[in-house]
Amino acid sequence: MDIGGSGIKGAPVDLDRGDLTQERCKVLTPHPATPDGVADGVKQVVDHFGWTGPVGLTFPGVVTGGAMVRTAANVDKSWIDTDARVLFGGRLGGLPVTVINDADAAGVAEMRFGAGQDRKGTVIMLTFGTGIGSAVFVDGVLVPNTELGHLELNGHDAEKRASSKAKEDHELTWERWAHRVQKYLAHVEMLFSPELFIIGGGVSRKADKFLHLIEGIRADIVPAQLQNDAGIVGAAMRADR
């Protein structure tokens, strides 16, 4: 299950191949995105598949211990200090639940099945959607909950300037948006000196429209191979641990 600022989507996952075994089901994220409202959406998706096994869920914020929500930038603030494992487990009739930051989940999937396979050194996965999520890996090991979308860029949270939502809200052309993404990547590169950037989120399906416009970055830049399914796959991987 992948909980985002605009949609809640999920599907059963084949963990040997890293792909979905059925077409994913998606419902709209409620507004306001309160814990109870989101839990109702999660139950709707799980019930759609008649699923009775472990459930992995992503969350768009810092999650500690596979359960506790510590930040809530793009959902209702009432999520802060919520035990998401207890909330979702109760709503799903006691099914075993694991919760992980959404970008971390996408990154875990890409490192095993996608663009990050066999890559050493520092790899940074960035997911562009309602906000900007990040997953940082050093020699394949995740550094959890980095939240690099909240780095300052031109006096604002970077995700307010360079997310997919910012592109839509400001009606930016691909060229203008790519320029903002380039400035953001340059800032992240200055701080972390990665060998590879993996660009994820729904925008990864349209990489041909903007990646070639990004210049001056030393690290390799590639689109996520699992595209917008990466979060679902990564959540399932964590549920299977």
Image (tube, rainbow, N blue to C red):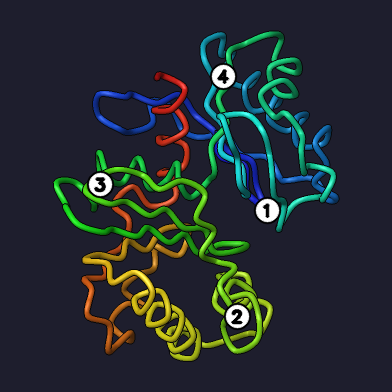
Of 174 and 140, the residue lying toward us: 140
Q: Which callout, 4 or 3, points at the residue further toward the start of the chain?
A: 4
Q: Which mark is residue 114?
A: 3
Q: Which callout, 4 or 1, points at the residue further toward the start of the chain?
A: 1
Q: Quadrant of residue 12?
A: top left
> In the rendered view, does 127 fall on the left or right side of 150?
left
**As displayed, is residue 124 above or below residue 103?**
below
> In the rendered view, does 3 fall on the left or right side of 239?
right
Which residue in the protein does label 1 denote?
5
Judged by depth in the image, the label closer to the viewer, 4 or 3, is 3
Identify the element where label 3 is drawn: loop
Q: Amino acid at mark 4?
A: Phe
Mark 2 and mark 4 in contact (Cβ < 8 Å)? no
Identify the element where label 1 is drawn: loop
Mark 3 and mark 4 in contact (Cβ < 8 Å)? no
Percent x, y of residue 27: 68, 40
**As displayed, is residue 80 above or below residue 175?**
above
Identify the element where label 4 is drawn: helix
Which residue in the protein does label 4 denote?
49
Percent x, y of residue 118: 14, 46
Q: Which callout, 4 or 2, points at the residue further toward the start of the chain?
A: 4
Residue in the image at 25% along x and 29% along y: 17
Q: Which callout, 1 or 2, points at the residue further toward the start of the chain?
A: 1
Q: Which mark is residue 161?
A: 2
Label 3 and label 1: CA atoms lie apart by 24 Å
Dividing the image into 4 quarters, which one contains the C terminus? top left
Q: Amino acid at mark 3?
A: Gly
Of 38 and 126, the residue lying toward us: 126
